[in-house]
Amino acid sequence: MNLWIIRHALAEEASPSGEDARRALTQDGRDRFARGVRGLARIGARFDLVLHSPLLRAQETADLLDPVCDGETSVTAALARPPDDELLAEIAGEAVALVGHEPWLSQTAAWLIFGWKVYEGDPTTTLIELKKGAAAHLVGEARPGGMRLSALYPPAALRALGRR
Amino acid sequence: MKSSPLLPASKWLEELARQIDRTREVVEAEPVHRLRVAAGRLSVWLELGARRALRDDLRRLRRAAAAVRDIDVMSAHEGGASWAEALRTERAREAVGLRTFLASPRIETLVEALGLVPDPDPVHVRAGLQRLKRRVMRAGDRLDESEGEEAALHRLRRRVRRLRYALEWMGADAAELRGLQEHLGGMNDLSVELTRLEVRAGDHSLAGRREAVRRELLERRDLALEAWRTLRPRIGDL
């Protein structure tokens, strides 16, 4: 299967209420990510499931993936915490996108590629750096150690692809 | 922050959470119906805000409750002892499925996520309302092209319902749409019942009910088409 691990786009520093979960994307973050989505479309990324965290900035990033989503979106709390078996159980389909947050997305990628949870040893370790709006493309089976990293797209690279 | 042209979502979000809680305890007809209505209204609220996320989750929630709701509607009609028994058995099975679905942590997450969504931007609302009107009109066109085919009527029903909810979110009068929706909804209920009755075509004790439903369905269909023809020229002004 193809798994796309996508970090939410640029969000405001603080929400009006002060709650982290209510932080929305900035207009600049929306515009940039929308251009990045054109890049995803250009390289043929299509999703039959977009799983996203409940936090507002992840919801809004999932909204922007609409042009490359052929299937459904689904909210899951498993993307708003360290990766666990519950998250893996939700990954079903041939082309799935996970939209969430750091450091958990990098930890998810590392777990799927190497087979162990890097945060168990060192919570600050991330083996793959995902900037806001970046995407990692993994291929294989969605189980620990069952995937390989096919490509890592920084946000600027996705936008550049979208301009071509 | 621009002020929202819509009524606050909190009322329907609280209603959704309340009916989910009630249905987790006991799967009763009214809370299941209200749960579906709240989910449908919130889905339109998201659409008016140009939001895609959470709408599929709400649709799955509505769908999970649909089977129980359909059986409850059918059970309200007199169909004979064997039909009533078959519906009771089927409802018990569907109720277990619904409770299991509602017990999933995914449902709590959905309610929490809905609570994070800010009020829609007025620009999105205006565009969203026009889009919903266009969809109703297109569904009407397809109904004409199909010469009243049932699938086209059902498409119109779903779109009329969403437009009605959108207008109600705006505090507008949607009485005419509500009237049309009642005809279309009644037609759908009868259609669902007829499908199930026809599966039991060999059960002669249901022959009377089958015939009655066929007759009612045609009557409802005529009423729905008439209501649609009357309302159609005014959709743009709603």
Image (spheres, coloured by chain):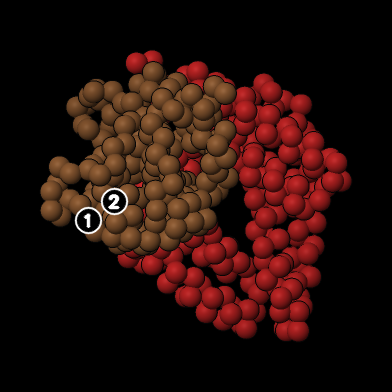
Chain colours: A brown, B red
Do we see residue B20 in this rendering?
no
Query: Quick one: quadrant of the N terminus of chain B?
Result: top left
Outermost residue on the top side: it is B2
Question: How far across and down, in percent of the image, does residue A11 sit?
Answer: 31, 26
Task: Name the quadrant containing residue A46.
Answer: top right
- Would you call the spot at circle 1 few (<14 residues within 10 Å), some (14-19), or many (20 or more)? some
> Is residue B236 depicted above or below A84 in this figure?
above
Badge 1 marks a residue whose secondary structure is loop
Badge 2 vs badge 1, beta-carbon distance below 8 Å:
yes
Residue A120 x/y as whole percent: 15, 55
* Secondary element at image label 2: helix
Q: Which residue is mark 2?
A: A110
What residue lies at 57% left-to-right and 23% top-to-bottom?
Answer: A164
Residue found 43% across the figure and 61% down from its top: A141
* Amino acid type shown at disc 1: Lys
What is the distance, in whole Å, between disc 2 and disc 1 at their CAs? 7 Å
The image quarter in which residue A135 lies: top left
Protein chain holding label 2: A
* Residue located at (64% from left, 50% from top): B185
Q: Is residue B152 visible?
A: yes
Are discs 2 and 1 both within one chain?
yes
